[in-house]
Image (cartoon, rainbow, N blue to C red):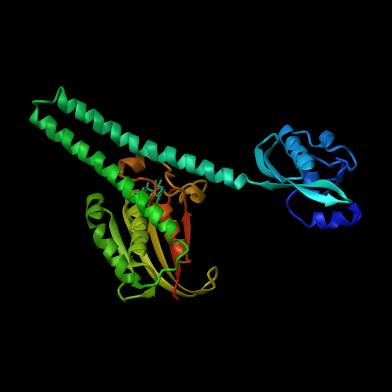
């Protein structure tokens, strides 16, 4: 097969490919390789066109030993580095051993590693803050407040608050990892969404009283059944309602309704809409709200006992139920969180 015949075949492959002949010269390269290395001149010695040392060693080993070799290749440009897994595989051409070099973009693997690194850093930071406080209180109780009954009570109360915070964070992390682990398994039960909204309203009773918010629930008088996991959908409803009460101002409205055909799911669906009249959310934050630990005002959320995991958990649960979530907000005019779940 001549290089002319090879060219269209190689161009059909999306990953960069370079074919080096037994004479150590570039026989052919596909369009992706020309993009990556900048128009590779054919018939030149590969050393003069592929200049990265790790790549050259790898090709040389494959040529000499007729064995497959692998290395990493990093392409640097002005804005970012992209890492590729480069593989040099021996191929027999015209009675001599050549090499086919292929490069696989492994940026997504790096991104996952980076995400895990960020996650560990976030968790450590979130745990360290209350832990430092507890250690400080213990020191005070052992020292200056040793014989002061009222101070002791105060410090114990504060320690309890901080320890509860840590415990909640751990619970939320476990909940998130359980939800993620089961994300690809469809829920098997049937649940009454109206009943779950009523349960969430009762759970949030003390918070509603404390904040003085008026909570109104519409459309949840009659049972409304859908396939789902009751604990998880309760978690979704509670999280959204709790956020609305915490970040809203005076009034929160929860509406349950049905739609014969949701235009995106293309199926009959139910809609749970949670609306508040708080400050609202700047549009730049909206796409990031469901990221773990993402909070618009860290300090305020923390004061309100938040871990920033609520919406991340909601997102995974909704996705497991094959539903979707929409967040809309008019800065200064409150927010609206809508969860749409298929009815069958
Ligand atoms: N109804 C809302 N109005 C304004 N901002 C909101 C609303 N709901 C969520 N947010 C913003 O989104 C952030 C993330 O919400 P999320 O529920 O994930 O975390 P949290 O409420 O801070 O903590 P947690 O839910 O773990 O207690 C919040 O910190 C807040 O800044
Ligand atoms: Mg929340």
Looking at the picture, tell me which residue is in the foreground, 325 or 2. 2
Position of residue 324 in the picture relative to residue 304 (left or right): right
Q: Position of 218 compared to 2: left or right?
A: left
What's the residue at 25%, 44% (across, down)? 164
Q: Nearer the viewer, residue 39 or 156?
A: 39
Depicted 149 relative to depicted 251: above or below: above
Residue that appears at 28% across and 57% down? 214
Residue 30 in view of the camera: no
Residue at x 79% of width, y 37% of height: 50
Q: Looking at the image, which is closer to me, 31 or 247?
A: 31
Q: Nearer the viewer, residue 239 or 98?
A: 98
Residue 80 in picture, x, y percent from top left: 65, 37
Residue depicted at x 44% and y 74%: 343
Give the quarter of the figure containing the N terminus: bottom right
Q: Quadrant of residue 54?
A: top right
Can you say whether 202 is above or below 93 in the image? Answer: below
Quadrant position of residue 22: top right
Q: Position of residue 123 (x, y in %)?
A: 39, 41
Quarter occupied by the C terminus = bottom left
């Amino acid at each position: 097969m001549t290089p002319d015949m090879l060219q269209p075949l190689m161009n059909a492959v999306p990953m960069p490919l370079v074919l080096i002949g037994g004479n150590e010269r570039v026989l052919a390269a596909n369009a992706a390789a020309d993009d990556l290395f900048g128009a590779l001149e054919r018939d030149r010695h590969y050393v003069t066109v592929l200049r990265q040392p790790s790549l050259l060693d790898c090709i040389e080993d494959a040529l000499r030993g007729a064995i497959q070799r692998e290395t990493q290749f990093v392409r640097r440009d002005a804005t970012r580095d992209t890492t590729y897994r480069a593989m040099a595989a021996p191929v027999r051409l015209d009675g001599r051993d050549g090499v086919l070099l292929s490069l696989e973009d492994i940026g997504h693997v790096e991104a996952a590693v980076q995400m895990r690194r960020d996650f560990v850093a976030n968790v450590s930071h979130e745990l360290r803050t209350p832990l430092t406080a507890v250690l400080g209180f213990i020191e005070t109780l052992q020292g200056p407040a040793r014989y002061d009954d009222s101070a002791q009570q105060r410090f114990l109360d504060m320690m309890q608050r901080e320890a509860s915070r840590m415990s909640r964070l751990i619970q939320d992390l476990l909940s998130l990892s359980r939800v993620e682990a089961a994300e690809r398994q469809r829920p098997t039960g049937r649940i009454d969404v109206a009943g779950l909204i009523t349960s969430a309203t009762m759970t949030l009773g003390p918070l509603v009283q404390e904040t003085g918010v008026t909570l109104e629930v519409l459309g949840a008088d009659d049972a409304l059944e859908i396939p789902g996991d009751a604990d998880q959908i309760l978690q979704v409803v509670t999280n959204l309602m709790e956020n609305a009460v915490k970040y809203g101002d005076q009034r929160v409205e929860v509406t349950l309704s049905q739609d014969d055909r949701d235009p995106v799911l293309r199926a009959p669906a139910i809609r749970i809409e949670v609306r508040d009249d708080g400050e609202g959310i700047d549009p730049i934050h909206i796409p990031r709200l469901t990221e773990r630990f993402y909070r618009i005002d860290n300090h305020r959320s923390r004061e309100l006992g938040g871990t920033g995991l609520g919406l991340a958990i909601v997102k995974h649960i909704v996705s497991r139920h094959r539903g979707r979530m929409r967040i809309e907000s008019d800065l200064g005019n409150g927010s609206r969180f809508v969860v749409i779940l298929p009815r069958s």
